[in-house]
Amino acid sequence: MKSADITQVINEHTRWRRQFFNAFAGGNYADMPLSEHRGCVLVLKLAALGGAIDGFAGYARLLSVHDRFHAIASEIVDLSENGMAASADLLLPQLSEASYHVVELLGELREYLGGSVVL
């Protein structure tokens, strides 16, 4: 697994989210593999930090928000693949909010760890 610092993880998440939203905004779902989010390894990378994050108060919240983000993304993908793009579009604000919270909590984790940790 390639190492990446938290800032890089935040940037990768933000870039993926932008691509996801651009695919939906243009109605051109074929331009991006929408199910790509299912290959996310953030939880594995966080688990590899072990005891270094035991004192981070937002850890459980980060995991919960991250799970919610993926549940919403999965629902959007499923709806779009079943010809229900209009219904999928209605979930985009929820996905955006969950994404924002993931990035916010990763930023808090970065501060907690002093910014120098490698995932």
Image: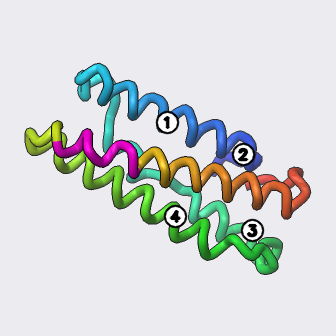
Disc 4 and disc 2 in contact, CB within 8 angstroms: no
Looking at the rendered image, the disc whose residue lies closer to the viewer, 1 or 2, is: 1
Counting from the top left corner in percent of width and height, residue 41 is at 54, 56
Q: Secondary structure at mark 1?
A: helix
Give the mark nearest the N terminus, 1 or 3. 1
Q: Amino acid at mark 4?
A: Val
The residue under label 4 is 65
Mark earlier in primary sequence (1, 2): 2
The one nearer the camera, 115 or 24, is 24
Name the residue that disc number 1 marks.
Answer: 16
Q: Which mark is residue 4?
A: 2
Q: Is residue 102 left or right of residue 94?
A: right
Q: Residue at x 30, y 30 (%)?
A: 24
Residue 114 point in image, percent of width and height? 91, 57
User: Viewer-nearest of labels 1 and 3?
Assistant: 1
Position of residue 53 in the picture relative to residue 61 (left or right)? right
Q: Is 93 within the magenta?
A: yes
Q: CB of mark 1 within 8 Å of CB of mark 3?
A: no
| Structural distance between the alpha carbons of marks 1 and 3 | 23 Å
